Every structure is written in structure tokens, then in C-alpha cells.
Amino acid sequence: MNGLMNGLGKEPGHMARAAAVKVMIFDVDGVLTDGSLTYNADGEATKTFNVLDGLGIQMLQKSGVATAIISARNSPIVVRRAADLGIAHVHQGIHDKRIAFARLLEATGVTAEQCGYIGDDVIDLPLLLRVGFAVAVPSGHAEVQHRAHYVTRAGGGRGAAREVCDLLMRAQGTYDLALAQYFA
């Protein structure tokens, strides 16, 4: 990959990579959330999700791009959020994300090159190095950012997922159609 690229200085060809994505995969902690874990009195971890990200994911799905979650942590909160958003492919509690990725490819019938993945830490590298469109968040580990095709301007849990969804729809020519219903 060609090194650190962000919303202003993007890797040449990142839009072509985004145009080829049929399945967009999201990490959770640090991507769909800001990476913070808060424990309640019962010792259960809570997470905060961004509504802009959620609507972006739903719009992306309606545009024809499937979505998935692959997370090393196991959390019932993630199952609930995925159900709320209609994300059918949820793989949690698998530290070696390559295993979940192989299962996802088999279930969807797409190739690795037809997938996008957004992550933030070195545990995400095995997938970032395999997918056709690798994305990192600005707070992500330097090794992850260095190997990404695109680094979002927005942070994890602060609109990064929405930024990627919008970028994919623009690259695939479906963005205007996705917004049309809101202008009626």
C-alpha cells in the first residue's frame, strides 16, 4: 500500500477501490465507537454508538452494499446495534479475524478484493492487508494508518463509519439516489 492517506491527501485510485466494494466490514471498538469502555455497577461494559454512522450504514445497505461486523471482543450490545441497523453478518469473539473473514467470504460469495474493512489497531492488519479497500481512523495505530488506502477525517464513534459509507456510495454512483428520498 502507498502509505498514510487521509481525507485530504488520498491514495491515487482509492475511489476505484471503493467502487469495487460489495461488502463493507466494520471493526467495533475504535471504529463504530470511540474505543472507550465504560463498566457499569454490574461489571458490564457499555459502548456509545453514533447515529450518523448508523444511518450511513443503513443507506449503504439500501444502495446494494452488504455490511458486516468483525470484532475480537464479544458483546451483546454489538448484537443489539447490528440488529437495529440490519447488519446480518456479525462475527464476534474471534481474536484471529482471518477466521471470521473466511467465514464471511464463504457466506457472501464475494472475493477479498470486493471487500472493504475499517479498523484501528494492529489486530486489524490481517484483514486490512487482504481486502481491496483498507480504511483506518485518524486515532488508529501508526502501522494501521500506514497500510490503509484511506484514513478518515472523522474519528471512530464520531462519524468515521458515515464518512466511509458516503465515500463508497459516491464512488459507486449511488449517493445522490440515497439522498433523494430526503429531498422529496
Image (tube, rainbow, N blue to C red):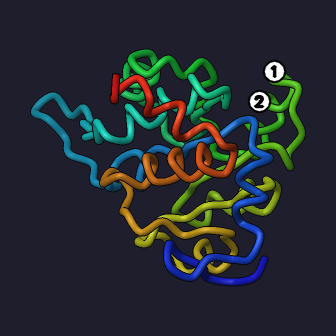
Are the residues tagged 1 and 2 within 8 Å (C-beta)? yes
Q: Quadrant of residue 79?
A: top left
Q: Residue at x 44, y 37 (%)?
A: 56
The answer to whether residue 162 is above or below residue 10 is: above
Q: Residue 61 — which label?
A: none
The correct choice, above or below, for 16 with respect to 139 in the image is: above
Q: Position of residue 170 (x, y in %)?
A: 59, 49
Query: Circle 2 sits in a helix, a strand or a loop, which is it?
Result: helix
Element carrying mark 1:
helix
Instruction: Kindly identify the amino acid type of the residue bearing the numbered disc 2.
Output: Leu
Q: Quadrant of residue 100?
A: top right
Q: Amino acid at mark 1?
A: Ala
Residue under label 2, please give it. Answer: 104
Q: Judge from the rendering whether residue 97 lies leftward or rightward of residue 46; answer left or right.
A: right
Find residue 83 and report its horizontal and vertical position in percent. 44, 16
Q: Position of residue 132 (x, y in %)?
A: 80, 55
**Callout 1 environment at 10 Å: few (<14), some (14 to 19), or many (20+)?**
few
Residue matched to label 1: 107
Q: Is residue 123 above or below residue 117?
A: below
Picture coordinates of residue 12 (x, y %)?
A: 74, 77
Q: Which residue sits at x=46%, y=23%?
A: 82
Residue closer to the observer: 115 or 126: 115
Residue in front for this viewpoint, 153 or 13: 13
